[in-house]
Image (cartoon, grey):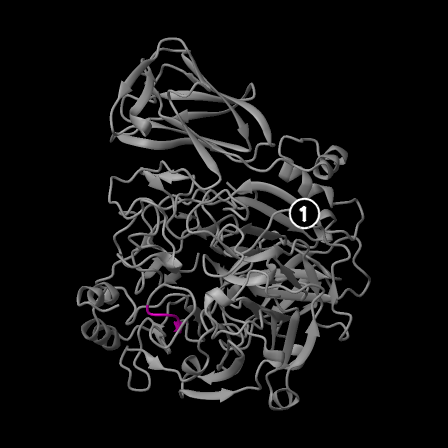
Amino acid sequence: MVRGLSCTFFFALDILLVSGAKAPAWNGHTTHGSTIPRAFTPYYVAPGTKSYDSSSPFVHYSGKWIESFSPGYVHNTIRSTSHPKAAATFTFTGTGVEWFGNMGDKHGLADVYIDGKKVQTVDNYSEAPMKQQRLFWKYDLPFGKHHMKLVNTGIRRDSKPKGLLDVDAFVVTYGTKPTRQQVALVSSSNSSSQSDMRGAMDLVEASSNAETWMLEQEGSTGVHAMQLSIISPSHAIIIDKVEHNPLTINGHPAWAAFNGTLINVGGNPVVEDHTSAADFGDVDGLQSVRILEPCESDDASGCDIYENHARVRMASPRWYNTVMRLQDGSAMIIGGSKKGGWMNNATVNNPTVEYWPPKNIHGSNGLPVYLKFLQDTLNSNLFPIAFLLPDGKVFMAANQDAMIYDWENNEEQRLPQIPNGVRVTYPMTGTGLLLPLSPDNSYRPEVLLCGGSTVDDNKPGYEISSQDPASAQCIRMVLTDAGIGAGWQVEQMPQARTMPDAVLLPTGEVLIVNGAGTGISGYGNVLQQVGASNADNPVFTPVLYNPSAPNGQRFSSQSLPTSNIPRLYHSVATLTPNGDVMIAGSNPNLDRSEVKYGTEYRVEWLRPPYMRGERPEWVSQPPRVIGYGQSLQMEVKLQQSATHSPDIKVALMDLGFITHAVHANSRLVYLAASLSTNNEKTLTITAPPNENVYPPGPGWLYLVIDGVPSKGMHVLIGDGKGPKVDEVAWQNMLGMTAMDQYEKAKGDGAE
């Protein structure tokens, strides 16, 4: 679980990038033995780990145990006991350990000790019998020799005696022995606990300086954080592709960790020879539309994702597409590839947009609309960058090009090409933001694009290297006639980055974090891979960008801490309702891996200086639904340090949906706000004037006084209703398309 924000884990999600039907190997890469169908179990020996079965000499048993033999056990053997206080002790050297065994209706509770300290009581009960289950895992141990002890309590969940305990296997994560310099750093740390080498190192960079940002490593996502979105004041949803994550649910690994309605679209076909268990999944994800209904209970009970390909689907298959919310509340689904792979190409390109719910526009009657821009931008054009503009049109960037798309009239306005040969979309991944909108300049739109690569997208993977330099370029353009005429304004980040994340802060600043100094996105494709990573030279220090500062003075890393966790392909970062930044993910691998640049479950919290001082507060609650142009009065409390005539801002923010350096729907709109002259505790706020400035849906209100933000308050902008549903267009889309088309095409012999 992550600290501050909770995560709940869903069962059997065929999520974006989910492996779902018998396609050739992912990125042309296969795992030995993965094409042999067999009963699925969570037991998995990741690269960089080693398995020890129940008969290993490193396992010592005390009390009465029985050894059994069956092909259904790891290495055909298992040890079991129903005797209270019977124990198994496993001695290992490494940084992590997993315990595998059976679950069933006769299994009971076991206490787990690590190095003499009780860390958990594990409940092994299950109504249905399940073999080779991951019963316990811990990955954050300091490198060295450890002792794991399992003690049978002898009782079951229902308090009946003779609870059963199994030991089938242990899997050890080797980890890396720390250098002398790292040991010295940890020894000098002020951290009260040095049980976690990596966590302690994260705190080394922090200081008591009031202007210094703090970095804390605390918590685990449980599933790899490929996708991330804040969905309530206390919860984030974390979504992964199908792989052997440590958290299990109903006998298999979890693939999502826990509201306005959220839709999630597209994904993989089922990849038969992707990971070890050829039957990892059997649902094609390429046309999927998955719906998470509003769900705001503290424990997320009753939350679920709805998926029904026969009724709810896209018209065409899409992999690595972008989704953004429009001013009518519907979603525009942009581009992608018709099948999974790596670099896009004309054979599999999907150069169209479609809408959810389906709509009849330009004679499409619910079917996709061709977009020439998505044809012209091959080959590096997956995950196009897109934002709704205050005039209702859409900005798009892909590869080396950008345009403004009038979606209501199906007209493209091409913009000046991105300078200096830099490509900004997958796999030469950069990042982009719509800079803050303000009534002070009539919501004048300006975009920022940072990072990427100049690698030629016509090169095959065997001519690209993980050591090819990334780009340090950042460019801005005001999207008015005058701004477009002036062209792109070019700046340089302190360090080159590919796969960076750009996070809007309530202050109007932008935090740039994560990424690599060389290589490109993906895994298993290029020369000089590190493990399987197509990128190398992680960038560990964030940079703060101030859009309102003079050119040449906008970037600073002076007060920002340096992490020691590589955040490369499949990393994410987001602002939280508390006002800090949550950083997670990184897995440039076919499946979970523990080799260099392996699967990362640790969560970091980057805390701005204002988190340690007094902050302004919302005293009264706003209306649940705020209409466009609505004026409302809110009771507030200013911090004691506020000036006599404070600088007041109210930031309405969409925290976005983050994946692959795309921060879809990320948005900051400043609202007109003023304190009452008669009562300094009453703040009058005016909502956005229309749905173009802020599309209808959820948002967060932050009160910013003299540059210090409050915590965010959850609101809903608009009338609270869903988008208009065109039943005729929907039915036509269903009638004119087939579900899981990719599967059917392959059945006809298509590639």
Residue 635: tell me if it is visible: yes
Task: Please give the name of the residue rendered at 51% of the width and 50% of the height, measured from the top-left corner.
Answer: 531
Rendered image quadrant of residue 538: bottom right
Q: Secondary structure at mark 1?
A: strand
Residue 501: tell me if it is visible: no
Q: Is residue 281 in the magenta section?
A: no
Residue 473 in the image, given as x and y percentages of width and height? 65, 72
Q: Is residue 332 in the magenta section?
A: yes
Measured along the vertical axis of the image, is residue 634 above or below residue 419? Answer: above
Q: Residues within 10 Å of mark 1 (few under 14, many from 20)?
A: many
Task: Please give the name of the residue rendered at 54% of the width and 61% of the height, measured from the top-left corner.
Answer: 655
Residue 391 in the image, given as x and y percentages of width and height? 52, 83
Residue 175 in the image, given as x and y percentages of width and height? 56, 37
Rendered image quadrant of residue 204: top right
Question: What is the count of numbered marks?
Answer: 1
Left or right: 219 in relation to 60: right
Task: Please give the name of the residue rendered at 28% of the width and 75% of the height, measured from the top-left corner.
Answer: 726
Measured along the vertical axis of the image, is residue 96 above or below residue 524? Answer: above
User: Which quadrant: the C terminus?
Assistant: bottom left
Identified by mark 1, the residue type is Leu
Measured along the vertical axis of the image, is residue 564 above or below residue 636? Answer: above
Q: 599 or 609: nearer the eye?
A: 599
Residue 498 in the image, given as x and y percentages of width and height? 58, 64
**Bounds of the magenta segment:** 330-338
Measured along the vertical axis of the image, is residue 649 above or below residue 233? Answer: below
Circle 1 is placed at which residue position? 215
Left or right: 354 in relation to 619: left
